[in-house]
Amino acid sequence: MFCCFHCYAANDHSQGPCAACGQPVEKPPGLSTTDSLIWALGYPDPELAILAARALGRLSAPQSIAALRAAVDTGSDIYLRAEALLSLIAIEGPDARPWLKELGQVRLPSAGGIAEKTLAESRSSECRQQGHQSRRASCEQPGALQPATRSAQSSATGWPPPSAGPDRWTLCRQGHVHWGANGGAGLLLRHVPEQGDPVYLLAERSQHVDEAGSWGIPGGAIHDGESPEAAARRETTEEIWPLPPYRVTGVDLQDCGGWRFHIVRADVSRPFAAYATSETYATGWFRRDQMNGIRLHPGFRKWIQENARRGR
């Protein structure tokens, strides 16, 4: 099947008139790389559209700003909208700030969260450059976003965006923004060999989630009526499927102002191949000493430090 350059309709031929719109199926001769990528933003397959949005950001193509903004505003895929927003931030830099402030109020967790976090980081960076101490409260819990100040979450701004159900941003008592109205859970899988040190399965977080580029455990929001172990298993299956049988050995709780993240510890009989998805760049099995050489998610780094003090 071939996608029409003009209407995206599927055709069984790569050249000639489109069966749907009658225009030529093939792209016009001499089309630039940037224009081809802009066209691909509307492709029916979201995976291709996401790759196009990412490439436009890396090219820093200013002529793509209007198309990327349209993808954020009207895109049917939430990951495409988030990727398009990240590319806009890369292209526009400080010029994107007024638009980001407006976008931070929309009812779109991925794009709205990225917008609010980018504004917070921008303000924090300016404070440091001017010799002032950042007022952002630190939080090392999985799924947390750093607000610039408590006022950023007031009802006057509409942030966090109101939403029904557990898959939404929520505030803890310390004023930090977390993903999951019922708290969160993640699965820490370990393999203990007959000889040598245990290895743990970690995933590198993609640009579609907060703390992109850091390594941690798969996890997410707990749904209504769901146990932490069931939530951890569901989220892990979604992010690095498939999961082999495992044995739960314990659950560790991290609390941040009443918002809780459950680290479900479990053992597997052998390391298995874990596949990266749109929420993960890569996966891997690591010994504790090997984790010193990678950037860890703040929440998981805190767990490592706490367990090291306990001798675990």
Image (cartoon, rainbow, N blue to C red):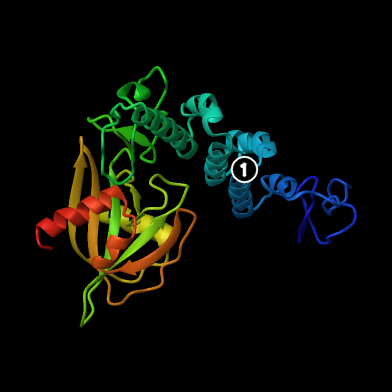
Residue 234: image location, x then y, percent: 36, 56
Looking at the picture, which amino acid does disc 1 mark?
Ser
- What residue do we see at 52% from left, 30% from top? 94
Which residue lies under the disc numbered 1? 60
Mark 1, secondary structure of its residue: loop
* Quarter containing the C terminus: bottom left
- What residue do we see at 85% from left, 45% from top? 21
Report the side of 92 relative to 105 (left or right): right
Q: From this viewpoint, is residue 187 visible? A: yes
Residue that sits furthest to the bottom in the current view: 194
Q: From the viewer's perspective, is residue 171 above or below residue 290?
A: above
Q: From the viewer's perspective, is residue 247 above or below residue 234?
A: below
Q: Would you identify the image quadrant in which residue 200 lies?
A: bottom left
Residue 124: image location, x then y, percent: 36, 31
Q: From the viewer's perspective, is residue 56 above or below residue 296?
A: above
- What residue do we see at 24% from left, 57% from top? 264
Q: From the viewer's perspective, is residue 261 above or below residue 203?
A: above
